[in-house]
Amino acid sequence: MNILWDPDPSALERYRFALGPDTTALDSSGMVARALHDNPQVEQVVIGADVPVEEACQLSEAARLDRPELGVILLRSRIDVTTLSQALRAGVREVVGADDHTAIADALRRSRELTSRLIGHAGGGAAREGKVVTVFSAKGGVGKTTLSTNAAVALASEGHRTLLVDLDLSFGDVAISLQLVPHQSIFDAVSMSGNLDDEALRSLVTRHEPSGLDVLCAPNDPGDADRIPVPTVAEVIKVARRSYDYVLIDTPPSFTEHVLASIDVSDALVLIATLDIPAVKNLRVALDTLDMIGSPKDARVIVLNKADTKVGLRPEDVESAIKTGIAVNIPNSLTVPASVNRGVPIVLDEPKAPVAVAIKELVESHIRTQRASEEPDHGDAAARKGLFRSRR
């Protein structure tokens, strides 16, 4: 299957002879990226002449890490040495004149042959990948980090290779919540961008010895947050999902570009709220935003924290306000802040406590399900919009 990325709606008909019938036309980088993420059958991407070379190279560089067998062919109205060298450095297989349909067909044939050889060399089967779960709330103070750490510890304690990534790059609390003293952080991945692999990632994580959980901590200096590019975060997650059974990502309470990058490649999105009007309002806004940017609804898991608090709101009121069912209700408990202050996750400290039981229910019913490479396709991926702000 081929993808033609071209903003011109008539481009597919213009190149039909060269590209063949098994070609889908998409008009934005976001749609192309989502289609590549969701559809392993795509083998070639042809990028039209009107797409800026910088965006074409960005897609090719990302694909080189995630899908090395993917062929990328760039069409240009005029080919100069600068464009050619820039494209080849980014992993584009060939740069072809947009008006030479015979040359386009020949380049596509050669690219298909190379793809077939690469797939055959890899054994013809897709690698088993871990499941990526992003934990998010548009409001702070709802227990997001507590939930992330306890869910990750629960998975690791059961023997699953689990990584917890603290993506609250300015004010992340995962390390202190687990009483960790990290010597490396996600900021150290910046210098490895483009060359990050399993071994390099292992050198950056800090082990939580009681559970066996690996943690990629946030930088100690909040000023480093602005120096971590979005592609670095995407690369970290891609490498992590090949190295771990589960990758959980704790996030700040806002849709930053880093958070959008995380959501974009996640298999599940856990959304948290509490029984107060601001939290419910922000959850409703978050759901509307996710709808707008094309995030799949069937990947969302709504969690209501402190669900039995008597404050004049009921879980049914929340469901009515957000027009979505709540998957898990977590009860309120004074043992939770006590466990946080001791740096001992409650799933380890008091595994039979109602809060711990509810978190384990979340893990068993909504996280510890089929892993990413085993899950069914949920519809037309090409129709979804991308999440990276750098996409068009």
Image: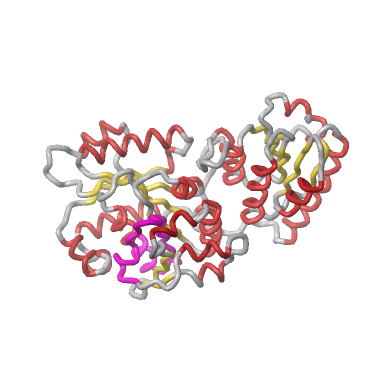
Q: Nearer the viewer, residue 275 or 62?
A: 62
Q: Residue at x 26, y 54 (%)?
A: 358
Q: Is residue 255 left or right of residue 272?
A: right
Q: Residue at x 70, y 52 (%)?
A: 90
Q: Quadrant of the C terminus?
A: top right
The correct choice, above or below, for 157 with respect to 62 in the image is below
Horizontal and vertical percent position of residue 286: 36, 38
Q: Residue at x 79, y 53 (%)?
A: 114
The correct choice, above or below, for 283 with respect to 261 in the image is above
Horizontal and vertical percent position of residue 250: 38, 55
Image quarter of residue 122: bottom right
Residue 372 included in the magenta stretch of the image:
no
Q: Nearer the viewer, residue 362 or 47?
A: 47
Image quarter of residue 313: top left
Horizontal and vertical percent position of residue 293: 47, 35
Q: Quadrant of the N terminus?
A: top right
Horizontal and vertical percent position of residue 187: 48, 63
The correct choice, above or below, for 382 with respect to 262 in the image is above
Q: Is residue 7 left or right of residue 172?
A: right
What segment carries the magenta color? 152-180
Q: Residue at x 49, y 56 (%)?
A: 228
